Each structure stands twice: as C-alpha cells, then as structure tokens.
Image: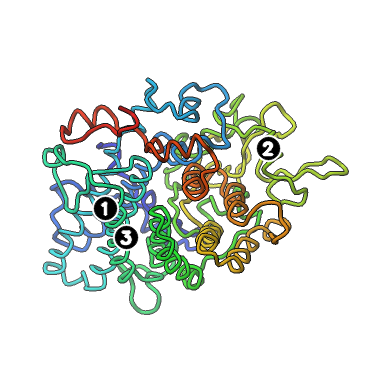
Amino acid sequence: MKRLIRYTLLSVMVSTAVVFTSCEKQLDQKAADVASEQLQWQSISDTKAGLMGIYGLMRAALYEENGHWIYGDLRAGDFHSYTRADLDAIHEHDLKASYPLMKTLTNWRRFYAVINAASLFIERAPEVLEKDKRYTEINLKWDVAQARAIRAFMYFYMTRIWGDLPLLRSSFDNGEFLERPKNSVATILDYAESELLKAAEDLPYVYSLGTQEYYNEGFGVWYGALFNKITAYSLLSHVAVWGQRYIQADAYSKFVLDNYARIGVSYSSIDVLTGSNGIFSQQYAYGRILGIVAPFSLSEATVTGHIEDLTLAEPLVYKKHPALYVPKDTIISLFPEPNDTRFGIDTISGLTRTNYFTNYSGEVPIFSKIKVLRDGGVSNPSYAVYGSTLLFTRLEEMTLLRAEILAVLKQDAEATRLLNVVKTGRKMKGYTDASSEDLLTAIFQERRRELMGEGWRWYDLVRYNRLRGADPKIKEMIEKEGIYWPIAQEVLNNNKKLEQNAFWK
C-alpha cells in the first residue's frame, strides 16, 4: 500500500482549471501519509496534508489497473477486447478466471485505505483546532465535510462492485480490520446517504469566495478542485437511484439541476467533450461535477490508469491495435442519425462524422473521444503518456439521471425536456411520443451514447434491467446477485468472518 500513499498535491486535486496559474505553487507540495503516526495533528499544515492525502488515495484506488473503466464499461458493454483474454473474460462475466488483473480488481483493500484515511481525519482534525489558532472553525467544518463525502463516495462505489461490505465507521489498524463481517447493501447505502447529507449541510458551493480564504489561498486555487455542495447532492442522487429510492432521488437531483450554476459548470459542446484540450484535460474544469485530474505538468500523467491506455492505437499513438474497441456494427446501430455530432454517416455521400472515433474505415475503429496526451493539445504519437481526467459525473450525466428519475416517477413531460436538452445539444432529433422507443429506454440509450467510455455502461444496464428486465441474462444475474464481483481470496484469507459472494462460491 505504500505506493498508493505519496502523491504530489496536484494528483489529489479534483478538476482544477488551468486558467488560475496561482494554483501551481500550492500544488507543488507533497501530500503526507495520512495513515501514519508521523502525522501528529499539531498544526494547520497537518490538516492540509491529511486532507490532500485522502484525495490522493482516492485517485490511486480509482486508477489502479484502469479499474474505473473496466468495472464500468466492460461487463456486457459496448467495448470488446481485441486480443486480451483477461478483458474477454470480464466482458463475459468470467470474473474468477485466473489472471493477474482479476487478483487486483477483486481486492478492495485500496478503497478501504481511503476510508481509513477519511475516518482518521474526522477523528483527529478537531485536535488541531485546540492547538493552532490559524485553524478556524470554518476550516474544520469544510475539512470534515469533505472527508465525510469522500468516505461515503467510496462506500457507494464499492457496494456497486461487491454488494455487501464490512461497514467501518471509525479508523482502524490492520489487525483490527481483519475480523469484520459484512453489512448489507441497504445498510451501506443508508450510511452513505446519511454521511453525504451531513457533508452537504456544511460544504460550500465554492471555496475562498470573498474575504474568507481557505488555507490562505484564493478562489482560483480551489475552483473545481474539491468536493462541494453540488458534488454531494449529485452523489446523493446516485446513491438513491442505485437503492431504487426514486422519490428521494427526485429531491436530490432537482437540487443539482436548480443550483449547478452556483459552482460555474455548464453543458459541454462537442468540441469541449472530445477535444484534447476539452473537459477531460486539466485545462478545462467547466462542466465537471466530480473529476480527478492527473496533469503531466506536475509529473502526474502516466501510461496506465487512463482509458487511453486501453482504447488508443495508431495513428494516435504507437500501438498497432487497441486493447478495447467498439465494433462497427455497434457504432452504426447506436448512432443512427447522420447529424449526430458524436458520430454520424451521411446517407447520401456516405461521409462519416467521427468525433468519437478515429480510423473508422480501418479494420478496428479507435475510440478517441478521450485522447489527452500529456496535458492535451499534443498530437505526436510518441507521447503515449496520458493526463486525462477521470470524470465521474458532469452536467450532461446528471441531466440524464434526472430524466431517468422523472420517467420512473411518471413525470414524462419534464423527463422528455431534459432528455432533449442532451439530444438536441448533439444535433439529434428531439424525443417525442411518436418516437420508436419508449421514454425510459430512450433515456438509457442516450446515456449509452453520451457517456460512452466514462464508466457508466454496466451500472446503467443493471439499473435498466431492474426496472424493465429486458435482458434475461442480466435479469437472472440481478436475482442471483451475480452483478457483483467476487472477493479476492487474499481478503477472504485475512478475514475469517467474510464469505465469498454467493454467486461466486
């Protein structure tokens, strides 16, 4: 776990806009090992290092072995493996196949490292308030709220992957953690919701706006960089939807759609969505609600941990074939309208609009919606080092989620309006009652198009089939809890109170 712990401060920032150059001095500092006893909780520098360390551990957990994209986009999804048997196995739900990748992805310890760091911070940060007069009540309130929100996010993220989990409400050492039983998905979701509600009450919309500076830094340093009130309500919306509590999700998602302008986000044009200097690059924060950056400028870009490692190939980088690709027949069926700015084929000329794909006419289309070499703006294929943002949610995603919620609640007029905000923004025809698909199916199909490559497809398939049962195989997996991953044998060996998830026994 040591390699997960030390990161430059920028690596733990969430969606920072490059226009604020003053942030670079702030980000050159090193984050401390938040789980270490060397952190004595004596001064404001300790709380700052501890908080930034939590963000760093979260980034490490999500990026490990390209896990975010493999968990979210590969199982039964639109992406297929070109030659890798381990990725083929995941696509076909063979999650106990004997590959090193499975060993990593079935192990949840890296996520519990984040949770432990957050719990430790919540417990110890109040000590600094008594010891350092520079550390104010507002510092403590905002810091603890962020730690609560991140801890809740990690529990929500894990329960979508593994289902039942040990629920740890306080910090632990390794020996203490080893003997904890599971708690149910419902209990985990209830806890995440309660913690996010507490966090949302205290989180600001923005940091350092006006005369009150956060850690003696101005607005520009923190803009788009930390969890805020809209982040919390967006996560609350997802927690409620995953638990099929659509009435609560209605209230949470309405808050997001009513107040998103207060954090300065906006809808993304197709150029912003697919450009190398767009929303997935460090340079552009507007539109992100929760994202985690990895900028090349401060040595945080890597060759692995990004979707480009799986999807890019010649002519974009020096790689003959991508590890993952979307087959042509899937592309054609998914993007039937010629004017769709993401992908379309003109019915008269046969010319293609390929903002999502490169080399469509070749043997294997290259999924190039996300293509941030270094910090973006680089087209030289020799720079196969990636600095793209892991974008968990953005305004279009939340708009479609709210459309889903309202469709389930039979508020079809507003659900249709929100769906059409995204569809017409991509130059598609708006949805009407005369459309060939029913409204809920149309919403999920639009999510499939708009969010391709952002880690949502598998979870959307689960939610859709909970509501409709359209795919018999996935419906059966839902009933038998096969939607969850098996637990790594190493974890089971170290905790005798755990049992393997029933589907994988």
**Residue at x 14% of width, y 48% of height:** 38
Crowd rating for badge 2 (residues with CA inside 10 Å; few <14, some 14–19, many 20+): many
Amino acid at circle 2: Thr
How far apart are the two marked residues, 2 and 3, measured between alpha carbons?
41 Å
Amino acid at circle 1: Thr
432 to 376, vertically: above or below: below
Task: Give the quadrant of the N terminus.
Answer: top left
Q: Nearer the viewer, mark 1 or mark 2?
A: 1
Under circle 1, the secondary element is helix
Between disc 2 and disc 3, whose residue precedes?
3
Observer-nearest of 177 and 371: 177
**Residue at x 40% of width, y 65% of height:** 248
The residue beneath circle 1 is 187
The residue beneath circle 3 is 193
**Residue at x 36% of width, y 33% of height:** 105
Whether residue 369 appears in this view of the structure is yes
Residue 384 location (% of width, % of height): 54, 34
Task: Give the quadrant of the C terminus.
Answer: top left
Observer-nearest of 192 and 138: 192
Between disc 1 and disc 2, whose residue precedes?
1
Under circle 3, the secondary element is helix
Crowd rating for badge 3 (residues with CA inside 10 Å; few <14, some 14–19, many 20+): many
Amino acid at circle 3: Glu
Residue 365 location (% of width, % of height): 67, 33
State which quadrant residue 223 falls in.
bottom left
Q: Which mark is residue 328?
A: none
Under circle 2, the secondary element is strand
How far apart are the two marked residues, 1 and 3, measured between alpha carbons?
10 Å
Between disc 1 and disc 3, whose residue precedes?
1
The residue beneath circle 2 is 358
